[in-house]
Structures are given as C-alpha cells and as structure tokens.
Amino acid sequence: MQCPWIVRRLTFVTTLAATILVSLSASGADASPTAFTDILQPTLEQSCVKCHGKNDKVKGKVNLLELKSAADLTKNPELIRKLIEALDLKEMPPEDEPALPAEKRTQLVATLKDLLHAAIATQTSSPRSPIRRMNRFQYNNAVQDLFNLKVEVFALPERMLREHGNYFNPVSGKMPDSLKAGSRPLGKSQLIDKRRLAGVAPFPQDLRAEHGFDNRADHLSLSPLLLESLLQLSDSIVESEDFNSRNCGIWKEFFDPPAKAEEIEPVVRRRLQAFLTRAFRRPVEKPLLDRYTAHVLGRIRSGESFTQSMKAAAAAALASPRFLYLYDLAGASNRAEQVDDFELASRLSFFLWGSIPDQPLLDAAAEGKLSNPKSLATQVDRMLNDHRMKRFCDSFPSQWLQLERIIASVPDPELHPNFYFAKFRASMHMMLEPLLLFETILVEDRSILELIDSDFSYRSDLLSEWYKKGGGGKTTPTAIPFQRVPVTDRRQGGVITTAAVMTMTSNPTRTQPITRGAWIASVIFNDPPEPPPADVPPLTEDEDSAEVKNMTLRERLDAHRTRPDCAGCHAKIDPFGFALENYGPTGIWRDKYENGRDVDMSGSLFRTHKFTNIVEFKDAILAEKERFARAFAGHLLAFALGRELSASDSPALDQIVSKTAAESFRLRAMLKQIVLSEPFRHKSNPVPPSDKQPKHAQ
C-alpha cells in the first residue's frame, strides 16, 4: 500500500540537498579583492603560514599559502568559518607566537564574516536536511497522539526525568515549589509506573550522535531487520488487548461501526481521509485514499468485522514510509525555497513536541497561515504553553548535557561509600537537578544565562545533604520529593557545577580535568575538541609512587601533555577543566587534595578573562554571553533540523542571537527565533536527474 513516488524518494535519500540562501548584507558588499589583499593576506603571511603552509608544514590540514585571492577563500565557506572561530576565540595565533592587536583581530573577523556572507549567497550547494525516519521517542509520541491514547505505547527508559503528579504546566508560567519526580536508574519501578499497551515491545533505542542528538538524519537508517520489526510493531499496537474503546480516544469516530444503516463506502472513505491526513501530516491524495478504502471494503466483504478491517488500515498506515519518515517534497530548483505550510507544520511539531502536528496546526497549514511569520509565531506561542512541551524537555536537555554518561558513573565504593545507598545510587537524584532547572527556565520563560548561574535549584533531601557533607537525607525508590531552594552560594547554581556533571566527568577514583574541559567546550561553547591521537598513553594511576603522591593533578597533567600535537587542544580545553577542580569526583567541594596540596583552579577564558575561583569563571562565561547564546542556539537549531550545522547556518545563528539578546536571552524567545530562522523555514530538495522523466514512464 505504499505510494510509488515515496518509494523512489527512499532510494535517493542520500542525494537530497538543502540550500540555505542568505542575502548578501550591506557589509558583505565590501568583501572585495582589495579587502583580501590589504587586510587578510598580509596578516596570514605574518602570523599564520608558519604553521599553515610554510615549508610544507600544514597543521589541521589547512594550507593558507594556497589562498591567492578572495575567490579562493569564498570557494570554501567552512574554512572561513574555522578562521573566524580561531581568531574570535583567540586560539590563533598560538600562545607562543606574537599576539594580534585587538583592533587588527576585530578587523580580520569582520572581513572574514563579510566574505562568509558573500560565499553563502553565491554557493550552489548547501547542507542537507535529508529524509529521515522517526526515532523511537518520536514514534511513541506520534502513535499516542494519532490515536489519542490514554496509555503509553511502550516503555521508554531513555526518558530520564519522569513526571509524578503532573507538575509540568507551562501555561501557568510557574513551576511548583514542591514536586515529585523519578529517574531512569530506578529501573522497573519507573517503567511500570505508566500504563502502556500490553504485548507491545519497542524497537531498539536510537543512540545520540557524537556531539549531536538522536534525531540526526545520518544516524537514522532503516535496515531490513528494523523494517520487519516496524511491520510487526504496527500490528501488535492495534491488536493489543489494551487498544480498545477505553484507552483509544478516536475509537468511536474511527473504529466503531456506524450506528445508522448507511452505505459503508462513504463512511470508510470519510474516516480514512481524516485519519490518513493526520498520520501523513498533509492531505491524502485521492489514489492513495482509494487504495486504503478498497482494502478496508475488501476485508469487510470477505466477512471481517468493520472494526478489524479499520484496524488493518491503521496498522498499514503505521508501517507506511509516509508515517515513518520526515521528509520535504521535491523542490522546483537547486536553490532554496520556502517549505510549504504542511512541511513547516511537521518541522514545528517534531521540534517542540517530538510528534505529529495536532489538528489546529494542520488547519493553520491548510489555510496557508503558517507562511505568515506572525501567524507562525502565534502557533509557537500556543505550542509552548501546551503540556506536550514536556516531550521537548524529555529529549533535548538530557542529550545537550550528555547526561546519559552518569548512568555508567561508578565512583569507587571505598572512597565514596555514601554515593551508594541500599540498592540505589546518588546519581538518580543528581541527574534530576539540571533537568528540573531547565524545565523551570522554559515554563517560567527565564533567561538561558541562568543555565550558567542561577539563584535557585531543585533538591531532594538527599541531594541537599550531599552538597553539605557528601551524604545523608531521606530517599524513596519511586517518586522522589524535590523542593525549590534558593542558592546564595554562587559556587552552586546553574548546570555546570551540579553534582551530576562533576560525577559523570570523573573516573572512579579522581576527577578528570580534560574530560570536564571537553564537556565545557562541547556543551557550553558548542566547540568540541578533536579526538586525541591514538598513540597517546593514558595518565598513570600509580598512586603508590612517592613522586605521584606529592603532585597535584595539574602537575601530573603538565608532564603528560608535552607532545606538540597535543598542546594545541590542551591549551584550549584544560582551563575549562581545571576551573572545576574544586569539585571532587562526586561534586563535593574541596579546597585541598588528599595529599594536602592546595587545589589550583586558576586560568583564563579565551585568553581574555582571568579567573582564580569558580565564581570568577562563571562571570567570565557571562561576560561572553553572546558566545554562549550562539552556541546554545546552535545546539537547538541542529536538534530542530535533525542535521549537523555548517558554515551556511552562521548568518542565521547571528540573527537568532541578535534578536534573542533584545529579549534578555529568554528561552522561549530563542525557541521562537529558531522556528522563524531561514534554515528552519526553507529547503532545497531538487528532483534528482533519475526522477526527471515523463509521467507515463513512472
């Protein structure tokens, strides 16, 4: 029952393209060959080619001597983006080379940005937002919404923060002072707490992409084995004993036989048309509707009941690529064009709700209203106040913060006995703190800067005692009571210094400044470091050595990273990691190491903001609030588009940050600007040459 054109589209998934067109700005018009020869080229030759081209020395696979003109540079927008970042973050020139004057650096960055805008405006290819299937989380939500189920479809252990008592109410604009929540490590007691369809088993979990999310198109393949699993899954859903009139909200309007004696065909057609339009996220074409209708009528004529026949049609719809895949229709040219209203409705609902559009969103699309930015913004406001935003909070923040890593954290029981209590671990309380903070910032429409430094948090009794003395407090194996508490000590507050982050970035016996630094670079500044060389030996853990016993961790790492090919990355990430060194392996504050040596966490951020304590480090990040906001917007945009970002997205990110800054960096304002951005509202899906053939040949 699959439509031929969608089958063809599946065969050329890897050839779909997306071009993001950005109009050349007024400043971009000045990006002339003169700017290259007068400003860029002299500086590159003076400060950069020593490591990037001279004497065949090419670090980072970047040979700047190959650039002879502005045209050479605009051919490679990604290189321009990397040059901008290296200069703007003051990573280049390296510390052992003469620094660029501040005025010169600013001039270089501005010139490169002009060139980047010019390059993007003229390029003929751009990043792809390819067709992709739903991940497991989205599939569960979509099926639940399609049938208006009062139960879960199947268990989702990846949902880390489990709501108890419906505390999440975004329309209220206020999170409660007291609430109850559960967490994934609590195991079966959490998975069976929610009612779900009996006999329905989920397909395998989709793993998060490295430095990305679990909705990335290039990670969501559909193997023959998974396809077979999805076919069986669709049947098991509609045949579950719990799939009945009590739990299925559309039962009466879709599955119940018509009460009046009337011709069956119009009833079946009318019901299928509404159902398939919702399932496939756009009006169903007549030939496809005819096939589904004929299938149902054929089963009824063969003696099958009306309800069972409609179940068969519903199962077929769940197995259709039109349901399973998120896709845009083919475009008219190779250039970017605005997505149609139904495509925009689907993008919007899967971004904010992780599911299919609801009826008001489909109605707005049918009326052509979503193409209007004001109407689109109105829909965003409506959706942000819906309880289904809990799904966004169940998916984005835990992946952004990489919190799945805490599941595998096992501090040494002898060194940290209080971490373990009964058969549970303190980590199940720790992981909920940053997630509850994120939910509060969303519900109360607070600034994203509070993710760095907040004056409140949510703590259980155990977690409150943990921060005070490393253990104690009451606990429960199911619904954990949390209280909203003021944070007056700025060593706490925000997500960076939570016990969850500190624990998951440590090994069983000690902190790992490099791991913590890489986490800060990846999560907070969206600038993940390159993987270390394969032949780098691990840091010795020989704690019995007298020499090692008397060293601080900074001294041990200084001796460890003497390799020239390691120095560049370490200079970038080590200050981030050592800034958190006052927090022990389980997040408890310390001023001294076990050997009595003082903890030295001093450093500088981007070679500009010196700090000697964690409060000064937070202040340094807040001084770079636009940089953090741009990084956070990049995470959101990548999550919204289901792909890795590229240089072509840079102008859009600049605009998102600029408009969000005018609204005090509030989270809801940023989410709205993501939706209103050019990449989100545009596509470039040219018809492949193999598909450009006469209709009679198709």
Image (cartoon, rainbow, N blue to C red):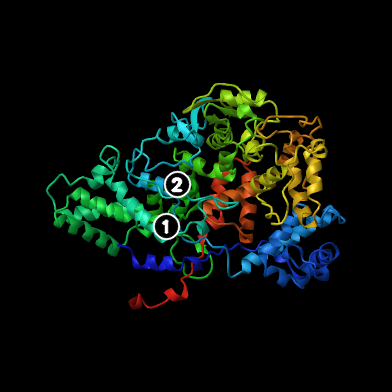
Q: Please tell me which residue is depicted at 49% across the width and 37% down the height of the picture.
A: 184
* Mark found first going from the N terminus, 2 or 1: 2
**Residue 60 placement (x, y as % from top left):** 73, 62
- Compared to residue 578, the image places residue 370 above or below, namely below
Please state which of residues 543 and 65 is positioned toward the viewer in this rendering: 543
| Residue 439 appearing in the image | yes
Residue 178 in the figure: left or right of residue 268: right
Cα–Cα gap, marks 2 and 1: 14 Å
Q: Residues within 10 Å of mark 1 (few under 14, many from 20)?
A: some
Q: Amino acid at mark 1?
A: Tyr
Q: Is residue 419 above or below residue 233?
A: above
**Element under label 2?**
helix
Q: Which residue is mark 2?
A: 137
- Residue type, numbered disc 2: Phe
Viewport quadrant of the N terminus: bottom left
- From the image, state whether disc 2 or disc 1 is nearer to you: 2
Residue shown at 83% from the left, 63% from the top: 43
Q: Position of residue 168 (x, y in %)?
A: 48, 33
Q: Are marks 2 and 1 in contact (CB under 8 Å)?
A: no
Q: Residue furthest right?
A: 98
Neighbours of disc 2 within 10 Å: few (<14), some (14-19), many (20+): many
Q: Which mark is residue 325?
A: 1
